[in-house]
Amino acid sequence: MLAGETRSEPEMALSEMAGGAQRYETPCGNGTLVWRVWGLGRPVVLLHGAHGFWAHWIRNIDALAAQRSVWVPDLPGMGESALASGDDHRAIAAPIAAGIRQLLGSQCPVDVVGFSFGGVNGTHLAALYPKIVRRLIVIDSGGLDTPLGEMTLKSTRGLDQAARAAASHANLLAIMLHNPASVDALALWIQSSGAARARFNPVSLIMPDHLIRVLPNVRVPFDAIWGEYDRPHPLLEQEQALRRFRPDMQFRVIPQAGHWCMYENAKAFNRTLIALLDTH
């Protein structure tokens, strides 16, 4: 930051949250995987969504850290983390697994919670490394071989600042959030900052069936949380798809929330996730 420049309120909010964390780095590709940890106690690992970084969880960390140690990496090729040594799920899971072993080896296996693309990552992690994953909870994840919901996105290319802001607002509602009032400055900043720093597009690692094809190989307890109004992955179809393989799973719905349900209705989400984590 140059002398005389001031930070926006979203930047200050993220800086304050990050300032309360311990920061670690573990090997990843030609660089490192960046981890942040808050709190003390039994660990839970949170995996963020596509084109995101640790701040996807900004409204959940404090509630979880009141009783857990909360470990949040920037996934390979996103946020501050380097690209993995390859572009498939095995290559992406490897540095996450190595980081968990290095940082949490004596406490393995650990609970893993994955949002959207992070849920697909977590499913592969649990299938490939069953000794380090104790149980898995996925949140609004794709890759279930179901049709995408209806979404209309606006291009931001070549627009002036006001038009670009309006398009970004519309896109958050089209994909991530349900209630227009939820599209605040912090949500816009997290989404734009994460997208700007992402170094690969993971869509081909999600669609159409990258989660459901590996789920039969997951032997640990498995549950799911979904936003009531998830547009990319409407909850009814997703629950039906998951129950074909995990009929006894717990499937919890967060009311009045879209895809990014842990941000949009954080209070209900935090209660739900904590209750699920306490069931095994």
Image: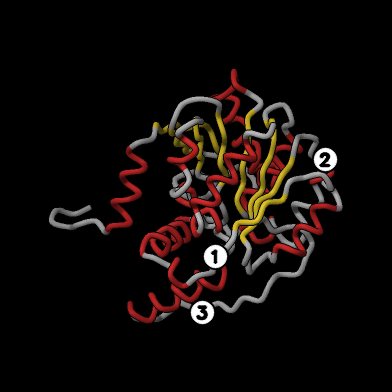
**Position of 151 relative to 191 (above/below):** below
Find disc 3 in the rendering and name its residue.
154
| Residue 214 coordinates in the image, percent (x, y) | 80, 46
Question: Mark 2 to mark 1: distance in Å?
Answer: 29 Å
Question: Mark 2 to mark 3: distance in Å?
Answer: 38 Å
Find disc 1 in the rendering and name its residue.
176
SS at circle 2: helix
Left or right of residue 247, residue 6 in this image: left
Residue at point 51% right, 25% down? 41
Residue at point 81% right, 59% down? 240
| Residue 248 coordinates in the image, percent (x, y) | 82, 44
**Position of 100 relative to 80 (above/below):** above
Residue at point 67% right, 43% down? 137
Q: Residue 185 is drawn in which quadrant? A: bottom left
| Residue 78 coordinates in the image, percent (x, y) | 50, 50
Find disc 2 in the rendering and name its residue.
217
Left or right of residue 174, residue 192 in this image: left
Question: Mark 3 to mark 1: distance in Å?
Answer: 14 Å
